Image (spheres, grey):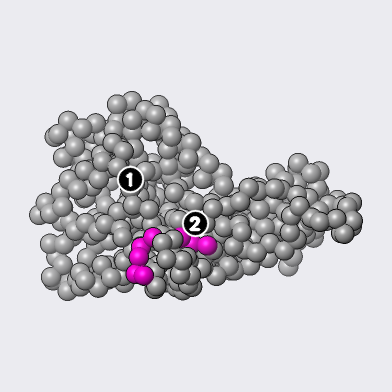
């Protein structure tokens, strides 16, 4: 068999489909998933620890799933808050995928969970490409990481629906330029909310939980420009396996043979 | 590096398409990679040949086409090239409600079938 086939398939189509299915599955049972993306050491776990403890104290049913390459340290820390915690090992894989997440939730996620926090592998590159079925995607950066982090990782910050700055208690010591950071975030993701937190001093405590609960109750999460892609026209897979064409070229084609890239952008990932 | 996962997804989809069509070999896979897709074509190329081993795609070439990003402001209609790192606030009206016309693609455009499995490239 020779010839060519126009596939026009998004490479991540399967993940995107699973993510969409998971999102509606969770929504139908009253749960929203919140994903947390950051570099290793940005304070994701400390922030999460504080939010989980707060939720537990307020009687809000939450749960957390934490993905790591190895070690159960994070899960042990989080479990002390008293909320259900699931540790997932990715065995070296740099990111979670929607199908994996769904598998981990099966038989574990308590039915009354209102907010499921998903702590992705510490990595700002790979996880950004994968929709996990979350309804709020959060990207974190600590003040020690430099103001240009959003420019270096436009995928992670550009697709965030909420940006959380951590460790603000040491901002002065590391000469963190807050305005420069905000300008850089605004460049790759205009309009996104940026929250400043310090798990040590309690600054910004509860904001993450509040935003997650608001989304659960129907508030619209921010839609980043990077996630707004022009509408994709219906896909008509066609094979050009019989060359020359069975139909004469004088007959007007129902489709064009050149395919301007603009007509087929990747589907909205959010 | 998630290029290995991406390569595996490409191989999986093309192998499925091949099985549906009864194709026994793949000469080339053409892939569109947007400037903002977060994928490094060179790393993908390396992973692709590994992911093809032992499949109907063995020996297939990966031909990537890089797609520049282009944004359009919904309210004012301004179009611009956001560049890298992308500048996504509208240069016309200063608004934050643009959309990307192109630049996020990660798409298998076309597959060229071959009569049978190809010899592995050196």
In the image: residue A265, left or right of residue A48: right
Magenta stretch in the rendered image? B93-101
Q: Position of residue B92 (x, y in %)?
A: 39, 73
Tell me the subunit letter for badge 1.
Answer: A
Question: Dot 1 surroundings within 10 Å: few (below 14), some, or many (20 or more)?
Answer: few
Within the magenta stretch, is there residue A91?
no
Instruction: State yes or no: residue B96 in magenta.
Output: yes
Tag 1 and tag 2 share a subunit: yes
In this rendering, the count of numbered labels is 2
Q: Is residue A112 visible?
A: yes
Q: Extreme left residue here?
A: A201
| Residue position for label 2 | A229
Q: Residue at x 44, y 49 (%)?
A: A270
Disc on res. A220: 1
Residue A178 in percent (x, y) is at 20, 69
Q: Position of residue B29 (x, y in %)?
A: 70, 59
Mark pair 1, 2: CA separation: 18 Å
Q: Quadrant of residue A83?
A: top left
Q: Earlier in the sequence, mark 1 or mark 2?
A: 1
Query: Does residue A211 sit above or below A185 in this rendering?
Result: above
Secondary element at tag 1: loop
Which chain is mark 2 on?
A: A
Q: Residue at x 31, y 60 (%)?
A: A191
Frontmost residue, A181 versus A231: A231
Q: Is residue A195 left or right of residue A68?
A: left
């Amino acid at each position: 068999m020779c010839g060519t086939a126009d596939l026009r398939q998004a490479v991540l189509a399967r993940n995107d489909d699973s993510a969409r299915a998971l999102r509606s599955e969770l929504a139908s049972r009253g749960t929203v998933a919140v994903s947390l993306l950051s570099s290793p050491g940005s304070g994701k776990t400390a922030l999460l620890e504080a939010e989980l403890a707060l939720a537990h104290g307020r009687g809000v049913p939450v749960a957390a799933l934490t993905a790591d390459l190895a070690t159960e340290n994070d899960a042990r820390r989080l479990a002390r808050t008293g909320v259900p915690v699931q540790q997932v090992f990715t065995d070296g894989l740099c990111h979670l995928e929607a199908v994996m997440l769904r598998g981990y939730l099966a038989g574990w996620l308590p039915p009354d969970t209102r907010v499921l926090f998903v702590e992705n592998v510490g990595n700002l590159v790979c996880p950004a490409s994968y929709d996990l079925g979350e309804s709020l995607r959060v990207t974190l950066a600590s003040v020690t990481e430099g103001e240009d982090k959003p420019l270096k990782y436009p995928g992670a910050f550009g697709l965030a629906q909420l940006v959380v700055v951590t460790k603000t208690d040491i901002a002065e010591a590391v000469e963190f330029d807050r305005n420069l950071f905000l300008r850089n975030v605004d460049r790759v993701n205009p309009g996104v909310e940026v929250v400043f937190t310090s798990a040590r001093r309690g600054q910004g405590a509860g904001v993450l939980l509040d935003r997650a609960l608001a989304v659960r109750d129907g508030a619209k999460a921010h839609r980043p420009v990077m996630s707004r892609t022009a509408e994709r026209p219906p896909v008509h897979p066609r094979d050009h396996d019989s060359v020359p064409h069975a139909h004469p070229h004088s007959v007007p084609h129902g489709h064009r043979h050149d395919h301007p890239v603009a007509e087929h952008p990747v589907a909205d990932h959010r | 590096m998630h290029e290995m996962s991406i390569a595996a997804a490409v191989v999986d989809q093309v192998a499925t398409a091949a099985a549906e069509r009864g194709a026994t070999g793949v000469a080339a896979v053409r892939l569109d990679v947007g400037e903002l897709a977060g994928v490094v074509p060179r790393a993908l190329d390396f992973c692709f040949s590994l992911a093809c081993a032992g499949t109907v795609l063995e020996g297939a070439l990966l031909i990537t086409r890089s797609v520049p990003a282009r944004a359009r402001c919904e309210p004012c209609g301004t179009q611009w090239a956001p560049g890298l790192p992308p500048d996504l606030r509208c240069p016309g009206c200063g608004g934050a409600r643009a959309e990307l016309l192109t630049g996020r693609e990660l798409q298998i455009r076309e597959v060229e079938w071959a009569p049978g499995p190809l010899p592995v490239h050196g």
